[in-house]
Image: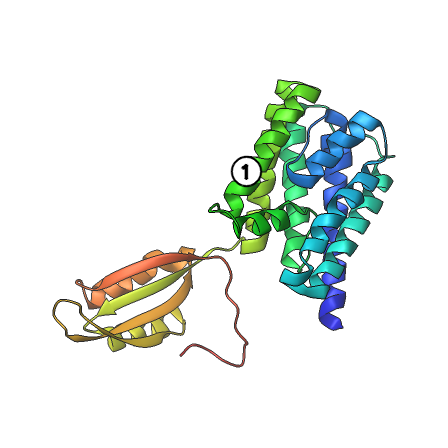
């Protein structure tokens, strides 16, 4: 119950931010987002009916598709997030527009919208059924989820061009790019870290130096050279990006021939009572 309560609080916050971006930046400037949100905005513009109503009606079929894939908890949270988004959209509809500068509206509206959507996604819910539909299609056809979403959005932005004008369609595309980047940062984490793999004949010595000098835990993994067949000890650790240069200097000071590879890590989770060492 504690976890669900926390999820609901953050989903509400995410929906609040998304609704604020839609009604105070994007919709008044005839700028749309991709997916179901974009379709709902255009449907509301054409029919002059309530945007919140379209957000609920268009999302319900796709949220129900997720029942078998993600379970009742996800579907319940998704229904809540869509409903609260519609409620906040109606609330902000009475608020004055923040700016009528299309570039500012695209950048700030897209950033705030993406932040809101990212918070919702990070708390086990969604406010747009496009990804659910894309996952269903990708299981039947040889296309990735990202490719299907992009294909759908191309038609949405082309439709926006005919409806609002091509300049608005281009600003809408910019909004989508900014929102996508904001979602990526929220879901994957703003403080990027690096996972490091070090293969050396002096693995244990390098590992102890990392522990003592960088105060980081390490894991030793037994490895074997593919050509030499020699036994080696691979050292694995995770460090903040800012400490990567210091770690490289430390490794090369011990073994100039050490093999070191790095990968991006967007989120690290471990209980404080345990460590990798």
The image quadrant where one finds the N terminus is bottom right
Q: Residue at x 57, y 31 (%)?
A: 154
Label tally: 1
Q: Residue at x 61, y 25 (%)?
A: 158
- Examine the rendered structure and indicate whether residue 14 appears above or below residue 69: above
Q: Residue furthest front?
A: 140
Compare residues 103 and 253 and report the one nearer the observer. Answer: 103
Compare residues 272 and 113 and report the one nearer the observer. Answer: 113
Residue 223: quarter of image: bottom left
Compare residues 83 and 208 and report the one nearer the observer. Answer: 83
- Image-based side of 85 in relation to 182, left or right: right
Where residue 157 sits: x, y (%)? 62, 28
Where residue 198 sits: x, y (%)? 28, 66
Q: Which residue is mark 1?
A: 150
Where residue 237 sits: x, y (%)? 38, 68
Residue 71: quarter of image: bottom right
- Examine the rendered structure and indicate whether residue 96 appears above or below residue 273: above
Q: Residue at x 62, y 19 (%)?
A: 167
The image quadrant where one finds the C terminus is bottom left
- Which SS class for mark 1? helix
- Image-based side of 117 in relation to 45, left or right: left
Compare residues 105 and 27 and report the one nearer the observer. Answer: 27
Mark 1 packing: few (<14 Cα in 10 Å), some, or many (20+)? some
Q: Is residue 222 visible?
A: yes
Q: Residue at x 51, y 61 (%)?
A: 267
- Examine the rendered structure and indicate whether residue 230 appears above or below residue 248: below
């Amino acid at each position: 119950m504690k976890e669900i309560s926390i999820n609901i609080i953050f989903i509400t916050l995410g929906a609040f931010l998304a609704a604020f971006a839609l009604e105070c930046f994007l919709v008044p400037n005839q700028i749309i987002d991709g997916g179901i949100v974009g379709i709902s905005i255009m449907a509301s513009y054409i029919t002059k009916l309530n945007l919140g109503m379209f957000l609920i009606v268009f999302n319900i079929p796709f949220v129900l598709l997720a029942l078998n894939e993600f379970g009742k908890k996800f579907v319940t949270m998704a229904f809540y997030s869509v409903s609260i988004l519609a409620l906040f959209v109606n609330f902000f509809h009475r608020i004055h527009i923040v700016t009528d500068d299309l570039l500012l509206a695209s950048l700030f509206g897209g950033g705030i919208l993406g932040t809101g959507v990212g918070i919702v996604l990070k708390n086990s819910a969604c406010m747009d059924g496009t990804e659910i539909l894309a996952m269903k299609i990708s299981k039947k056809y040889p296309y990735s989820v990202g490719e299907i979403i992009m294909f759908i959005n191309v038609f949405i932005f082309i439709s926006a061009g005919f409806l609002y004008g091509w300049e608005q369609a281009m600003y809408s595309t910019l909004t989508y790019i900014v929102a996508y980047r904001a979602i990526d940062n929220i879901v994957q984490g703003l403080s990027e870290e690096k996972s490091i793999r070090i293969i050396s004949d002096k693995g244990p010595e390098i590992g102890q130096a990392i522990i003592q000098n960088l105060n980081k835990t390490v894991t030793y993994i037994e490895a074997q050279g593919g050509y030499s067949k020699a036994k080696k000890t691979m050292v694995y650790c995770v460090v903040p990006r800012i400490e990567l240069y210091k770690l490289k200097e430390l490794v090369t000071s011990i073994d100039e021939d050490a093999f070191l590879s790095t990968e991006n890590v967007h989120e690290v989770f471990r209980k404080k009572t345990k460590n990798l060492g």
